[in-house]
Image: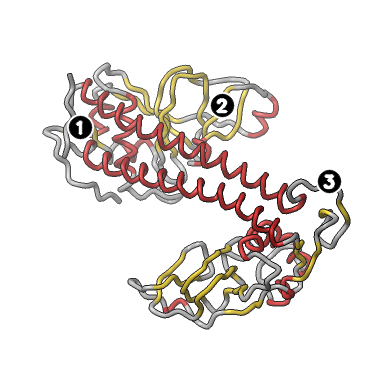
Amino acid sequence: MSNFPASYWEGQVSLDSLIRSDAIELGRGNVISKKDIRSNPGLFPIYSSSAKKNGKMGEYGEYMFDEELISWSVDGGGNFFHRQKHKFSVTNVSGYMRKHSDQIDYKFLFFILDFQHEFISFDYQTKAHPSVIRDIYWIPVIPLPEQQKIASILTSVDEVIEKTQSQINKLQDLKKGTMNELLTKGIGHTEFKDSPVGKIPVGWDFVYISDVAKIGTGNKDTKDKEDNGIYPFFVRSQTVERINSYSYDGETILTAGDGVGTGKVFHYINGKFDFHQRVYKLSDFSSKISGRFLFEYFRLNFISQVNKYSAKGSVDSVRMEMISKMWIPLPTLEEQLKIAKSLLSIETTIEEKQRKLEQTQSLKKSLMQDLLTGKVRVTVN
């Protein structure tokens, strides 16, 4: 059930022993139904078992707590959450942890439990009941100032992660709004006309994709991938594998023909690569079209257009003719390049922020491994 990393602490105690000594108290939340919430609306958050949105499931007119606590998910994985002091409730599929000792720091307690949780497997059959977790987790015996210093270091890294993620979210919203604006209204246009793709500037044309690009499929299967392959191998998901061959070298747009990425996964590449037999390739672009402009329009409007060919009204597989008969607007090449450049600028900034986020997340993982095992000790002034 667990496979904790080596511990370098001089002493550590089980969660169970802290409970038996009354240093820590465990409890379960209350049953709060959707009917209860509707009948007693309010502003106090309710936290449940989901790891999404910090576990928040809604708001209520009553509250159980107005204090700092740790809560965790009894159902669905056992995730821990640090709850700052505020008025809130937790449901019966969540537990709460309250400390009675002034020699335990809440944030440190959260970090040590959250770290250990990475090495424990809970699911909907093996649930994180209070009677279960008290026999699994342990707490190092170290002075309060050292706990607080470790918590402060990890909290500062969390703040950078949170800030960077917020910046990425705002940039993604900006790009989405900019895409909708530029790919339908263009730059500086004031007069518009009807077209198969909706209202477009009067000076724009509209064509089928097959009029400006060649459409083909790959001939490889996932068994052809190589762990240490030289070239990217595009399959029917967001994941890009590796392979030691390439069937195309140039500017290309790729999309999944079926599978989990259908209608959602798109790649733009200009170079050597290979691709799965159920991945479609748009290439050999006409001199009238910018590949990057087509890529941006394609991923913004693909689903809504190919849905017209589906009896289900949703995309679960794509045929070549669905792509070839997809209408696209056609501004002048000069305007296409300006639009593509504007969107690429935002995309590049997002990618830079994403790299920073991944680096900070990697730093946090290393710090947790060092600081929460006692391998590296902090100095307290």
Mark identifier at residue 94: none
| Residue 192 screen position, x and y as percent | 86, 51
Pick the front one: 292 or 122: 292
Type of amino acid under label 3: Thr
| Of pointers 3 and 1, the one earlier in the residue sequence | 1
264 in relation to 113, above or below: below
Q: Residue at x 51, y 62 (%)?
A: 238
Closest to the observer, 340 or 262: 340
Question: Label 1 amino acid?
Answer: Pro
Q: Callout 2, which amino acid?
A: Pro
In the image, 93: left or right of 139? Answer: right
Q: Position of residue 45 (x, y in %)?
A: 56, 26
Q: Residue at x 46, y 34 (%)?
A: 163
Question: Do tag 1 and tag 2 residues touch (Cβ < 8 Å)?
Answer: no
Residue that label 1 marks: 140
Q: Which residue is mark 2?
A: 45
> For mark 3, what is the residue?
190
Which one is earlier in the sequence, the residue at label 3 or at label 2? 2
Q: Earlier in the sequence, mark 1 or mark 2?
A: 2
Seen from this angle, which residue lies furthest bottom?
A: 219
Distance CA(mark 3)–CA(mark 2): 47 Å
Count neighbours of disc 1 (C-alpha within 10 A) and say few if under 14, some if 14 to 19, many if 20 or more: some
Rendered location of residue 184, percent (x, y)? 76, 52
In the image, is 150 to the left or to the right of 216? left
**Structural distance between the alpha carbons of marks 1 and 2:** 32 Å
Toward which corner of the image does residue 290 lie, by quadrant?
bottom right
Q: Quadrant of the C terminus?
A: top left
Q: Secondary structure at mark 2?
A: strand
